[in-house]
Image: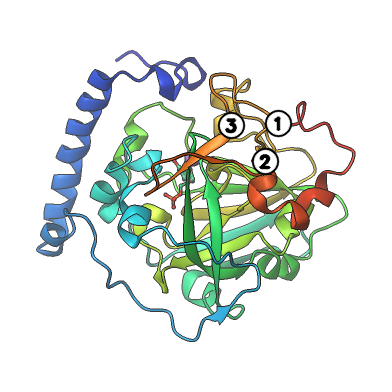
Amino acid sequence: MLIRHPSDIAPSEITPREVYRHRRAFLRSAGLLAAAAGAGGLLTSTAPARGATRLAGLRQSPFSTDEAQTPYKDVTTYNNYYEFGTDKDEPADNAHTLKTRPWTIAIEGEVRKAYSIGVEELLKLAPLEERIYRMRCVEGWSMVIPWVGYSLSELIKRAEPTGNARFVEFVTLADPRQMPGLAYPVLKWPYVEGLRLDEAMHPLTLLCVGLYGELLPNQNGAPVRVVIPWKYGFKSGKSIVKIRFTATQPRTAWNIAQPREYGFYSNVNPQVDHPRWSQARERRIGEFRKRPTLMFNGYAEQVASLYAGMDLKKNF
Ligand SMILES: Nc1nc2c(c(=O)[nH]1)N[C@H]1C(S)=C(S)[C@@H](COP(=O)(O)O)O[C@H]1N2
Ligand SMILES: [Mo]
């Protein structure tokens, strides 16, 4: 088998024929896994219905937008989660093989108190809030999603980062038995993302465990992901297993794949085009006419000060 180095293959190079072949492989492995899981597997092969575990007593957040929310159906069937396939509908079809319990996140690196925390404990670490955020994908579409979670800073402060900690790396699950997409070198697995420590500590940065008042569906990154609403969607890593504090800037999956196209910061910026397309406008899912993209995705008032004095064209 010819193994191409991940940096040699950009997602844009994947031809429809290759995608088709990959999809057949996905269906085959997903089918086997569904059968092994018993009758439950039969029910999960279609698009999800609402009915995941409801999260009670959510606080409303002052950070929420009052814009119209993207329908649940679109939020949960139009996804990027390449570990389950590169087509938008594949994560919803395939992610039922993701096993989200038990689940622990390891918090380590430049911290005084490294610790591991299970997902049940994580759900109780701080009061859960509903945060209705605008989300902007680098591909040019956007959604408004009622996430559930609390500020990531709650988790970080318990670790007591040392004076050397300047960045945070998010490592996500990479298990080929659960994730058929790992068979293809579309990205360097595991999918890794990162933030500067002050970005990670910003109150808008959400440790996310749910949406639409329920636990996260697998295709949206169950059981726990981050959501950084002023950055392009790919910064918001799904199904996180490790949070590592570092002195140096982490290498990230998209930056490794295409360094000219995806920088470390990836702040939503209508004035900085992607090398292959404009970022000035976006299509809100469900709308026909494109709307202008806002600086920092409309969160400039809250986050612009993080980048004071920085050249945002260089630090794209
Ligand atoms: N592990 C992992 N996280 C990921 C991705 C991925 O492929 N793998 N895709 C990213 C991209 S490009 C986007 S736009 C968002 C989409 O999140 P959503 O499907 O919940 O809207 O997830 C991000 N997080
Ligand atoms: Mo994205």
In the foreground, 153 or 279: 279
Q: Which amino acid does label 3 sit on?
A: Gln
| Residue at image coords 84%, 57% | 162
Indicate the secondary structure of the residue bearing disc 1: loop
Closer to the N terminus: mark 1 or mark 2?
2
| Distance of label 1 from label 3 (alpha carbons) | 12 Å
Vertical placement of 298 versus 182: above or below?
A: below
Horizontal placement of 76 versus 261: left or right?
left
Mark 1–mark 2 Cα distance, whole angstroms, equals: 7 Å
Q: Is residue 110 visible?
A: no
Q: Dot 1 corresponds to which residue?
A: 316
Give the secondary structure at mark 2: loop
Query: Callout 1: 10 Å neighbours few (<14), some, many (20+)?
Result: some
Pointer 2 residue: 267
Residue occupying the point 56% across, 22% down: 258
Q: Where is residue 40 in the image (x, y as percent from the top left)?
A: 15, 64
> Which tag is nearer the camera, tag 2 or tag 3?
3
Residue 300 percent location from the top left of the image: 74, 51
Task: Please state, as top left, top right, bottom left or bottom right, where the N terminus lies in the image.
Answer: top left
Please say if the residues under marks 1 and 2 sit with CB atoms less than 8 Å apart: yes
* Beta carbon of the mark 1 residue lies under 8 A of ligand 2: no
Q: Which residue is drawn at 68% across and 28% down?
A: 272
Figure check: 283 above or below 311: below
Question: Which tag, 1 or 3, sits closer to the chain's start?
Answer: 3
Q: Point out the tag, 2 or 3, that comes first from the N-terminus.
A: 2
Say which residue label 3 marks: 279
For label 3, the crowd category at 10 Å Cα-Cα, with few meaning under 14, some 14 to 19 and many 20 or more, is many
Residue type for callout 1: Phe
Where in the figure is residue 26, as x and y percent of width and height? 22, 37
* Disc nearest the viewer among 1 and 3: 3
- The answer to whether residue 77 is left or right of residue 57 is left
Res 137 seen here:
yes
